[in-house]
Amino acid sequence: MPIMKLFGTDGIRGRVNEFPITAEVALRTGKAVASVLRSSGPRRNRVLVGKDTRISGYMLETALTSGLVSMGMDVYLVGPMPTPAVAHLTKSMGAAAGIMITASHNSYEDNGMKIFGPDGYKLSDELEALIERYILGDEPEAPPLPPEQIGKAHRIDDARGRYIEFAKHTADNISLHGFKVVVDCGHGAAYFIAPLIFKELGAEVITTCNQPDGLNINRECGALHPEAAGELVRQHKADLGISFDGDADRVIFTDANGQVVSGDRILALCAIGMKEQGKLKHDTLVATIMSNLGLIEAMNQHGIHVVTTAVGDRNVIESIRKNGYSFGGENSGHLIFADHSTTGDGILSALQVLRMMREKNASLAELAGIMNEYPSELSNMPVASKPPLESLPKLNGLMRDATAEFGTNGRHLIRYSGTENKIRVLVEHREAEECRAWVSKFSAVIREEIG
């Protein structure tokens, strides 16, 4: 796998007006994408550009567009739009690439760029590495085009409508009459589209956090704070809460009691439901190493094999594509229904869960009760640097001790974040006190060896 300076686990991301999230880098990114993904056929030389609701999206969108059109690409601007909508429209409109300007669940101070190929999938590591070399000047820039070959930029007025119809179709336009749902848009990209889709299908919708001002995205709301939707569920006696992150590729649910339902429980109920319908190809669920041990136990009980990957929805998608599977996801709320979508899609996922509730005439709590979760403790610690974990002798010694002591009763996972300067410490164990004790031990050693 190429070692990259700009691309992390989910595109390029960082603090706005600091390298690499600057107008200059965005302009070079536009030129680089054009250099790598432009087609010999002029009709394919179009790029779809969407964004979430961060104030910095205006700056990056303008610079990115300038870079693209300077290289002869026609740019189709769709404005605030969920990441999965950009992926879908890139493929359906025959574009050479799609670019989503977003920092997903991060606060407004950050932003980034996710790049999709003409098939609607995120780019391979090799293509990202090539684009990075162009951005950094390690590849020679193409000579300037004559004025008559410069591209144009267009605003697409019907992009929302196209995606809305697609999303409803994935759930067979099922009637949601009789459902009352709370939809927390996180002041993000789903603020307009998501409530409209559920309303058009007949649900009674209580919408919250749908007034973005450029600065409030993900602020105490959305997928990172689903308890806010849970409180509204209790107040309005709703059937469930649906909370999206900033770019709506993730979703977290709350049941009718206002209790947060973990992403692993959603993975489990969807996998079981799909198997019963004959839609779970190879009877296999793809999850990441962050998924709870209880998920694997529950799947074994239902005759479902679990394949685990490294963290990141792109790793889940890669496994699904390579092996012909149909479903997978992350405990963090990414759900990939591969028969319908090329990436995680919060809106589509919510529709699938609602359809299962309707078809089984069951509450979300009833459907989610099919697995027992091991107690877990997760700590996200900021770090000033990211030395290789294998170079930290005290931490490695403590990890060996934990593995020996846990046996089959638990596990630990320590890794750096791919999008932030943080180290994540996860401990699962049948005893909750063991989780807390070992996270404390790991954290102390990390502070000592990294700072």
Image (cartoon, rainbow, N blue to C red):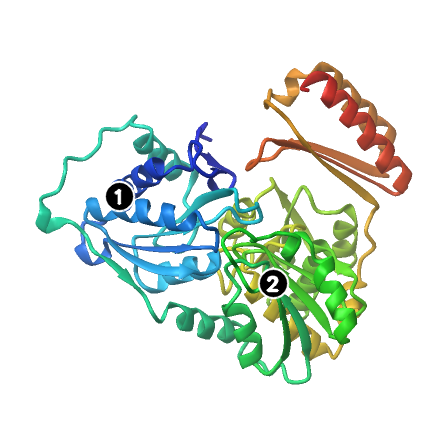
On the image, numbered disc 2 is attached to which residue?
209
Which residue is found at the position 61% from the left and 53% from the top? 329
- In the depicted view, which residue is nearer to us: 451 or 301? 451
In the image, residue 233 lies at what x, y percent? 74, 70
In this orientation, which residue lies closer to the viewer: 48 or 397?
A: 48
Residue 83 in view in this figure:
yes
Residue wearing tag 1: 67
As shown in the figure, which amino acid type bears the numbered disc 1? Answer: Gly
Quadrant of the image containing the C terminus: top right
**SS under mark 1:** helix
Q: Secondary structure at mark 2?
A: loop
* Picture disc at residue 316: none
Q: What amino acid is labelled 2 in the image?
A: Cys
Q: At which x and y percent is residue 168?
A: 51, 75
Identify which residue is drawn at 73% across, 21% down.
447
Left or right, 428 with respect to 195, comes to right
Q: Is residue 422 left or right of residue 233?
A: left
* Count of marks, rendered view: 2
Image point (46%, 72%), residue name: 164
Say which label, 2 or 1, has the lower sequence index: 1
**407 versus 279 height, above or below:** above
